[in-house]
């Protein structure tokens, strides 16, 4: 579900957020129009809009845990967690988290990767939000949902700044709702900064 | 904040007690300072950010640079609170646009830190944030990157310092602010 479909139609903040994202063609490989959110982070007003929209949505949903996917989920997750009084849980590449971890494998275009979470992260009766910068195939978010559910948490929603148009409407990931702020930008000369 | 015990803010002890020390990670002999347990306590995490924000909000900081990946957890909340830009300093090949890099030494071999070109304007006042300072190699690389594009690095901010590794002396004369020492 996109923000425009759910009460934010015409909200000027969404255009400001979209305009602040830079498209880098053919990164990391030919054919991919990479949605670069680092330019959004250079715009404190637009960055704050992202956090404010997510905080407004989640502050009354009784979320006790915000999980962020390494590494760009680490940028958006903590400000949301802090504002709604939830804990922040980093979901990491293999071998980075000390102590006992749960590990979940997911598919890449070629091969697979793993995501890990500390077993200490989830207590009983947790309501969790998962954050990443962008959702494309949904593979990483699905792995994240699995990790949290295996630890006994209830995943309330997944949230991303950018999402492919296929996630409009009631599209769900493993039965969980998905909330997205903007669609990917098209590449044009204006999106490159000097 | 950084070291005078008589003036220590009462919030600091609350943060210190939440840090988990994990022996022999990532290898034997290292006492790993795990800050993820601080993040599991909303009050301790908020106190950490508040302490830095209180220090920096009137210092005209226009850029907060965070070192991948744990600097990405602490840097953005500080940047948002003080109205500064956030600049991620990343491992090689993660940033999509044109970058500059700085090499730094590891125990065995080297690694690189990268920054986007054009991210910041010369004359910006910058803060560098990471969770921990050990030898200071990564922070020194970060300072170099920012100075190469004309930034003035005002200070480095870390939650934890390992003073015995003397990282503080490798910051090209820049001051360090830390909350908790581990000896």
Image (cartoon, coloured by chain):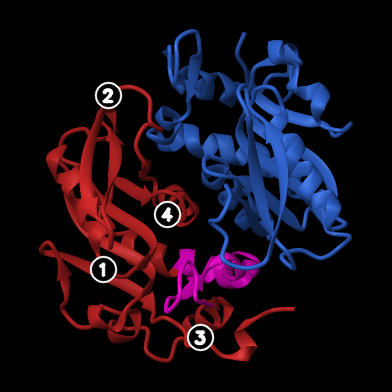
User: Disc 4 designates what residue?
Assistant: A73
Chain on which label 2 sits: A
Colour-to-chain, blue: B
- The quadrant where residue B5 appears: top right
**Left or right of A107 in this view: A185:** right
Labels 3 and 4 within one chain: yes
Disc 4 chain ID: A
Q: Residues within 10 Å of mark 1 (few under 14, many from 20)?
A: some
Sequence-first tag of 4 and 2: 4
Q: In the displayed structure, does residue B115 sit left or right of residue A82?
A: right
The magenta stretch spans which residues?
A: A25-52
Confirm whether circles 1 and 2 share one chain.
yes
Mark nearer the viewer, 4 or 1 = 1
Specify whether residue A39 is painted magenta. yes
Which quadrant is home to the N terminus of chain B?
top right
User: Which label belongs to residue A15?
Assistant: 3
Q: Which residue is mark 1?
A: A137
Q: Is residue A116 above or below residue A163?
A: above
Distance CA(mark 2)–CA(mark 3): 43 Å
């Amino acid at each position: 579900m996109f923000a425009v479909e759910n009460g934010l139609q015409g909200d000027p903040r969404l255009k400001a957020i979209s305009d602040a994202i830079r498209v880098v063609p053919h990164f990391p490989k030919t054919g991919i129009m990479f949605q670069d959110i680092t330019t959004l982070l250079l715009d404190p007003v637009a960055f704050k809009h992202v956090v404010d929209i997510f905080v407004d949505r989640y502050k009354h949903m009784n979320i006790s845990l915000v999980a962020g996917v390494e590494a760009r989920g680490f940028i958006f997750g903590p400000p949301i967690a802090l504002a709604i009084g939830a804990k922040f849980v980093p979901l990491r590449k293999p071998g980075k988290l000390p102590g006992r971890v749960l590990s979940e494998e997911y598919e890449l275009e070629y091969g697979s990767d793993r995501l890990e979470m500390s077993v200490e992260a989830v207590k009983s009766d947790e309501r969790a939000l998962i954050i990443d910068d962008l959702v494309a195939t949904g593979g990483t978010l699905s792995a994240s949902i699995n990790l949290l559910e295996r630890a006994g948490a209830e995943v309330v929603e997944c949230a991303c700044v950018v999402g492919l148009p296929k996630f409009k409407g009631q599209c769900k990931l493993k039965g969980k709702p998905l909330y997205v702020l903007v669609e990917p930008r098209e590449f044009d000369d204006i999106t490159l900064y000097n | 904040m950084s070291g005078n015990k008589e003036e220590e803010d009462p919030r600091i002890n609350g943060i210190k007690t939440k840090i988990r020390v994990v022996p022999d990670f990532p290898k034997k002999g290292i006492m790993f300072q795990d800050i993820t347990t601080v993040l599991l306590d909303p009050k301790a995490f908020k106190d950490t950010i508040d302490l830095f924000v209180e220090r920096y909000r009137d210092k005209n900081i226009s850029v907060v640079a965070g070192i991948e990946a744990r600097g990405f957890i602490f840097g953005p909340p500080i940047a948002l609170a003080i109205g500064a830009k956030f600049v991620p300093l990343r491992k090689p090949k993660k940033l999509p646009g044109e970058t500059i890099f700085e090499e730094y030494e590891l125990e065995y071999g080297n690694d690189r830190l990268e920054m986007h070109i054009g991210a910041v304007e010369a004359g910006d006042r910058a803060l560098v944030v990471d969770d921990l300072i050990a030898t200071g190699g990564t922070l020194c690389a970060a300072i170099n990157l920012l100075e190469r594009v004309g930034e003035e690095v005002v200070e480095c901010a870390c939650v934890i310092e390992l003073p015995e590794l003397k990282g503080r002396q490798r910051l090209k004369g820049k001051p360090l602010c830390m909350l908790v020492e581990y000896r």
